Image (cartoon, grey):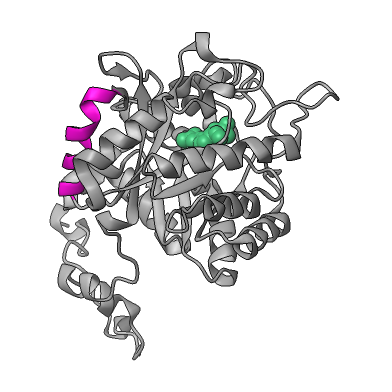
Amino acid sequence: MSRGANKPTSAAPVVLPSARLVLPVRPRRLRATAAIREMVAETALAPAQLIQPLFVTGGAVNEPVASLPGVSRLPLAALGAHCRRLAALGIRGVALFPKIDPALKTADGREALNPETLVLRATREIKAAAGDALLVFNDIALDPYTTHGHDGVLSARGGDDVDNDATVAVLAEMAVLNAAAGADFVAPSDMMDGRVAAIRAALDAAGHERAGIMAYSAKFASCYYGPFREAVGAGGGGGATGGAISKAGYQLAPGNRREALREACLDEQEGADIVMVKPAGPYLDIIRDVRERAGVPVAAYQVSGEYAQIHAAAERGWLDLRRTRDEALLAIRRAGADLILTYFAEAWARDYA
Ligand code: PBG
């Protein structure tokens, strides 16, 4: 017997006649080429749907934020040129967050009402440089201004208890100052009850009926804000320790879906022009719920911790930065967000605009 007789005879592919399935419905036909995939894409993202958060410093030079790779606090003098570049990329909005000199912080956060405070100077700078090409969204909350890092003034009860009505009164005044400086939208991020109605009334009484309100409506008490708190120097340090103070007395519990929807509905009734869900990626179901019920545009904030975790994994070579970024943003759109606040806005627009 020759050795060849024992060789396997199956080197050539075996094609059984029965391999052709009788299958009139083949969904893969719509995924066969790049052209057909592009044609049937259900979700798209455009630079005009992105809002770039910007940190502002009173210092003279860029200050990199360690836990947010690629993000720096910008000095006033750099803002005009920076914002014109963003507008040229097709981005239509920035959200401003000031880093306040610790010497100016007080328990009541009164620096927020200083007519020359950093964020108001920054707003004038940007509006002078970019005009109507770029909308400016100004955060309305006291956390950059208070020694304790809470979003409002503390009550006599002590602990982490923020006095709702006293805080709303200050925020309404703060909103008027921001609109007067040129903010196109004020964005209350404090989660106090009744603040949207109070801010709307105060803006209208001061003749700022054109200024809009983007309400942080479903804002969760999240550990994903850690790097942000480092960036603005609020809440007892940044990075992993940024969750040191508890905002659970006003921000939503992460497990509460029904309550999130209730907050968004209330803010719309009170006059919010845009409602927001925050964070975004871990709360896609909330974005979908709010999109289905609200009659106004829905924004989602992909927060500092979401950005930081993608960068951290990419730095270790564990994820591809660009593809993870793009997938995360697309998923937020698919969930129902009309607008996305994201630290990736500029980089994304550079890649696709
Ligand atoms: C504060 C505010 C926070 C963010 C935006 N506005 C932090 C907080 O509530 O503690 C977080 C944004 C981010 O993490 O990127 N009013």
Query: Which portion, as a residue range, is magenta?
Result: 75-89
Residue name at image x 33 percent, y 57 percent: 49
Drawn side of residue 301 relative to residue 81, left or right: right
Instruction: Tell me where residue 342 appears, x and y as whole percent.
Output: 38, 43
Query: Is residue 224 at all visible to an observer of this figure?
Result: no
Instruction: Tell me where residue 265 appears, x and y as whole percent.
Output: 65, 63
Q: Is residue 328 above or below residue 153?
A: below
Question: In which quadrant of the rendered image does the N terminus lie?
Answer: bottom left
**Residue 138 occupies quadrant:** top left
Q: For residue 42: magenta?
A: no
Q: For residue 87: magenta?
A: yes
Quick one: which residue is furthest to the front in this view?
206
Residue name at image x 69 percent, y 44 percent: 252
Q: Nearer the viewer, residue 80 or 324?
A: 80
Q: Nearer the viewer, residue 185 or 307?
A: 185
Residue name at image x 17 percent, y 44 percent: 350
Q: Nearer the viewer, residue 279 or 175?
A: 175
Q: Is residue 180 above or below residue 7?
A: above
Q: Is residue 177 above or below residue 210?
A: above
Instruction: Tell me where residue 349 appears, x and y as whole percent.
Output: 21, 48
